[in-house]
Image (tube, rainbow, N blue to C red):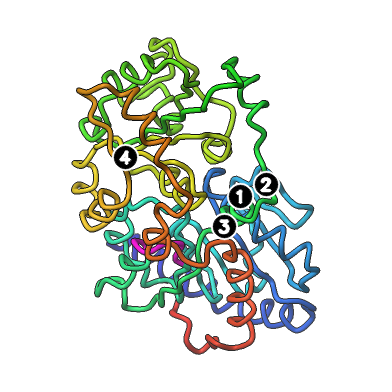
């Protein structure tokens, strides 16, 4: 108890000491400083279109990246939060995780990356330390509207910037490159099976049945793209577990790129299933209903089952898939897309414009919560 109080006292003293150097630094700082924090590379990728847009538009902000960014964009970069000089002021702090350093004095934005409805952790951990939450889709927006999360953070409908380039056609993944890499025929439909990972293995889909049946589908090029956590040497999965099926296993491409080149995507609750719906791909629900209940997403399951075809794994899977492909229309899923996603195709611009609005005083410094 004494140690905890001593630590709090030391932090308090440091905050007081920082007032003068921060005031001086702020006085001579020419541009607003916007910090992007992301501790995992797969989360950081969702910020890349935003960062690139800011650079391309020559927006006069000083950008700082902290965390696991594969691309540094030629801007100021730190490996971890503890590396950042705390005497420097921050105008806006944007994080893909609910992480707030104790020394932070800034407008704090939580960006709920991904559009999958695994929202239990979004509800479990309070966003009250943040001023605003940037929501990419309906489930995360609703999670942040929960009473326990409304102590401080104001949810905003932003969307998922990483989808913009795929939807607008500026990023096109060549099917021939995918087929050459995975050594599958180029004259057949590409079928991607993308199962999600769950901390409880009992919530995973039945890989043996699903992959076993999909292997029987002649005239289709099957590629299995498991969640990265399913390929690690853990109790829940490892690469060798999937290699034994004798099918193409994706360990190189982002699953989003793979699905962009696919003709058919099959999944459960994975974010990439919903991203594929946004890209107007032929998407099939694998029937794993229990995982939705576990993650508090029963209403999303109702939307999925009302919008997507589902495979009967005890029937003729190949015939079912061929029928689904023949009957698919681009307008399928329009109602789902209009309800589930925000600002499809324009999310990057909305994200940046929202930062601009905040910097211009939509949320003033007096409205910030204490760090």
According to the picture, the residue beneath numbered tag 1 turns out to be 166
* Rendered position, 217 above or below 271: above
Residue 184 appears left or right of 225: right
According to the picture, the residue beneath numbered tag 3 turns out to be 37
- Callout 4 secondary element: strand
Q: Which one is in front in this view, the residue at disc 1 or the one at disc 3? A: 1
Q: Are marks 1 and 4 in contact (CB under 8 Å)?
A: no
Q: Marks 2/1: CA distance? A: 5 Å
Q: Marks 3/2: CA distance? A: 25 Å
Q: Marks 2/4: CA distance? A: 26 Å
Provide residue 282's location: percent of width, then percent of height. Answer: 44, 41
Q: How packed is label 2: few (under 14 Cα within 10 Å), some, or many (20 or more)?
A: few
Provide residue 60's location: percent of width, then percent of height. Answer: 78, 74
Residue 160 appears left or right of 78: left
**Picture mark count:** 4
Q: Nearer the viewer, residue 63 or 161?
A: 161
Q: Which residues are magenta?
A: 135-140
At horizontal 31% and vertical 63% (from top left) the residue drawn is: 2
Q: How packed is label 4: few (under 14 Cα within 10 Å), some, or many (20 or more)?
A: many
């Amino acid at each position: 108890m004494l140690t905890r109080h001593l630590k709090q006292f030391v932090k308090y003293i440091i905050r007081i000491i920082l007032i003068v150097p921060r005031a001086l630094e702020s006085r001579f700082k020419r541009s607003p400083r916007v910090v992007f924090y992301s501790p995992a590379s797969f989360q950081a990728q969702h910020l890349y279109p935003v960062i690139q847009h800011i650079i391309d538009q020559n927006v006069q902000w000083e950008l700082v990246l902290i965390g696991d960014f594969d691309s540094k964009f030629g801007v100021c970069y730190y490996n971890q939060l503890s590396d950042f000089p705390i005497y420097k002021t921050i105008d806006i702090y944007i994080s893909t995780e609910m992480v707030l350093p104790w020394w932070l004095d800034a407008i704090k934005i939580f960006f709920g990356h991904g559009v999958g409805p695994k929202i239990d952790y979004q509800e479990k951990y309070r966003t009250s330390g943040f001023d605003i939450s940037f929501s990419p889709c309906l489930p995360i927006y609703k999670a942040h509207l929960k009473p326990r999360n409304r102590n401080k953070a104001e949810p905003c409908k932003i969307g998922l910037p990483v989808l913009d380039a795929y939807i607008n056609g500026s990023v096109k993944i060549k099917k021939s490159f995918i087929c050459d890499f995975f050594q599958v025929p180029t004259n057949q439909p590409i079928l991607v099976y993308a199962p999600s990972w769950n901390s409880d293995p009992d919530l995973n889909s039945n890989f043996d049945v699903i992959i076993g049946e999909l292997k029987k589908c002649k005239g289709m090029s099957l590629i299995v793209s498991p969640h990265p956590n399913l390929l690690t040497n853990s109790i829940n999965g490892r690469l060798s577990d999937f290699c034994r099926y004798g099918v193409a296993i994706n360990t190189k491409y982002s699953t989003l790129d793979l699905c962009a080149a696919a003709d058919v995507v099959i999944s459960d609750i994975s974010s990439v299933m919903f991203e594929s719906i946004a890209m107007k791909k032929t998407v099939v629900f694998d029937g794993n209903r229990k995982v939705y209940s576990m993650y508090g997403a029963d209403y999303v399951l109702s939307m999925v089952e009302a919008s997507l075809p589902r495979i009967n794994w005890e029937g003729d899977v190949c015939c079912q898939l061929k029928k689904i492909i023949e009957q698919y229309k681009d307008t399928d899923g329009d109602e789902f897309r209009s309800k589930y996603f925000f600002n499809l195709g324009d999310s990057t611009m909305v994200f940046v414009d929202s930062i601009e609005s905040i910097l211009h005083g939509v949320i003033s410094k007096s409205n910030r919560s204490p760090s």
